[in-house]
Image (cartoon, rainbow, N blue to C red):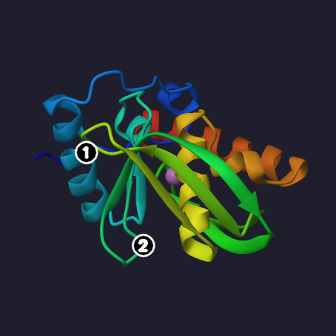
Amino acid sequence: MAIYPIRRFPDPVLAMKARSVETFDDDVKRLTDDMFETMYNAPGVGLAAPQIGVSKRVFVADIGEGPFLMINPTIVEQTGKWKYEEGCLSVPGRYWDIKRYDYARAEGFDLSGNPIMYEGDELMGRVLQHEIDHLFGLLLLSHLGSRTKRQVLKELREESLDAQRGM
Ligand code: NI
């Protein structure tokens, strides 16, 4: 197992649409082992493969009820509204009140390629929506209002340039 560095905005891999997993082999198992280790080390409640630079439709999560993972997941139902102060390991240290659907149900596959389903409201619904967004190349920034988003993007780009300059 290995802990990977977590990619941060504006790393281009975070904006890419991830590819579906075609073969359920040991490589996918190793990938998810490494993702769990990286997520728990961060610590975080969810991690999508693009966040460690792997553009595949895979995420791992644990909202305090035990680890689970989904391969090639899709949201099949979402209802209600819930506002929650949300953060992302790829935009560290920042949290915003973000309104999303309260309940979400996602269908996908486990490591053996068997169909699986996860569902829930509040934090469970939130993590499903957040992680599956990552697989479409969407960060939580895409859920901010346009004025807030412009300001935040400007700040994050400046921080990223400062980091490159070693400041
Ligand atoms: Ni995230």
Residue carrying label 2: 63
Amino acid, disc 2: Ile
Q: Is residue 23 left or right of residue 71?
A: left
Seen in the picture, residue 131 relative to 105 is either above or below; the reply is: above
Residue 59 image point, x, y percent: 40, 47
Q: For the residue labelled by badge 2, is the local secondary structure a helix, a strand or a loop?
A: loop
- Residue in the foreground of this view, choosing between 14 and 29: 29
Residue 61 image point, x, y percent: 39, 60
Residue 102 image point, x, y percent: 71, 70
Q: How far apart are marks 2 and 1 (CA)?
A: 16 Å
Residue carrying label 1: 32
Q: For the residue labelled by badge 1, is the local secondary structure a helix, a strand or a loop?
A: helix
Residue 87 image point, x, y percent: 57, 63
The quarter holding residue 101 reads bottom right
Residue 20 can be seen in this image: yes
N-terminal-most mark, 2 or 1: 1
